[in-house]
Image (spheres, rainbow, N blue to C red):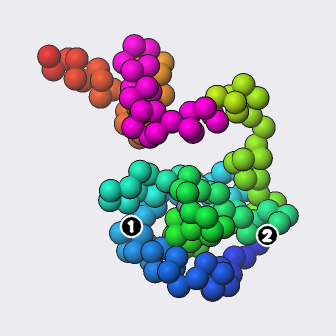
């Protein structure tokens, strides 16, 4: 069943400070892309001087739900509001029974390792992933795909040398 999101109610709930920050992101063209996931929508927010944040919003049995990588202690961060605004501008068809990312079934071993990885500082985690990617072509193409780079770039670099 499709559902309508009341952006005015959402902005009221988020508060003026969060809305002002969200509007800055919107003006900066963030998120650049939105993707439907689990009946809701996800996007990555890039902010100057900040690590990128992946945020998901959707309508679940509990109502409007947001999950974000950022450490905001509020339910509704600027990333979630900016993503919602982008999805609404796009005419996204919201499902009333969305499944948040955190609820999707994950291998318990993957879940355990995810907790370990989350505890690492972003810089150390990036170095670790880069080390693996440099030695494993499968990892390298997965990393490039996640970053939105085509695998052909590596081949082109080799051809050029
Ligand atoms: Zn956030």
Give the mark nearest the N terminus, 2 or 1: 1
Q: Quadrant of ligand 1?
A: bottom right
Residue holding disc 2: 63
Task: Judge whether residue 48 is colored magenta.
Answer: no
Q: Secondary structure at mark 2?
A: strand
Tell me residue 135's x, y (percent): 39, 13
Rounded to the nearest angstrom, the CA distance separating label 2 from label 1 is: 27 Å
Q: Magenta stretch: dominant SS?
A: helix
- In this view of the protein, can residue 70 be seen by the observer? yes
Q: Residue at x 40, y 75 (%)?
A: 24
Left or right: residue 81 compared with residue 106: left
Q: Is residue 75 above or below residue 117?
A: below
Residue holding disc 1: 29
Tell me residue 14's x, y (percent): 61, 78
Along the line of sight, the residue nearer the viewer: 124 or 53: 124
Q: Is mark 1 within 8 Å of ligand 1?
A: no
Q: In this rendering, which labeled residue sits more in front, label 2 or label 1?
A: 2
Tell me residue 124's x, y (percent): 42, 33
Q: Residue at x 38, y 29 (%)?
A: 127
Q: Is residue 30 above or below residue 21?
A: above
Task: Judge whether residue 116 is colored magenta.
Answer: yes
Furthest residue to the top?
A: 135
Furthest residue to the left?
A: 161
Q: Residue at x 51, y 36 (%)?
A: 120
Q: Which residues are magenta?
A: 114-136
């Amino acid at each position: 069943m499709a559902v309508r999101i009341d952006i005015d109610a959402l902005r009221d709930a988020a508060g003026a400070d969060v809305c002002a920050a969200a509007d800055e992101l919107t003006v900066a063209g963030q998120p650049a892309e939105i993707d439907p996931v689990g009946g809701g929508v996800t996007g990555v927010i890039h902010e100057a001087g900040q690590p990128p944040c992946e945020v998901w919003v959707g309508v679940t049995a509990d109502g409007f739900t947001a999950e974000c990588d950022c450490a905001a202690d509020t339910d509704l961060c600027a990333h979630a509001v900016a993503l919602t605004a982008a999805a609404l501008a796009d005419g996204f068809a919201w499902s009333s029974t969305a499944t948040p990312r955190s609820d999707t079934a994950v291998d318990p071993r993957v879940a355990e390792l995810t907790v370990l990885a989350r505890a690492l500082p972003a810089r150390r985690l990036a170095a670790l992933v880069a080390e693996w990617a440099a030695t494993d072509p499968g990892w390298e193409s997965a990393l490039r795909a996640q970053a939105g780079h085509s695998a052909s770039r590596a081949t082109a670099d080799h051809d050029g040398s």
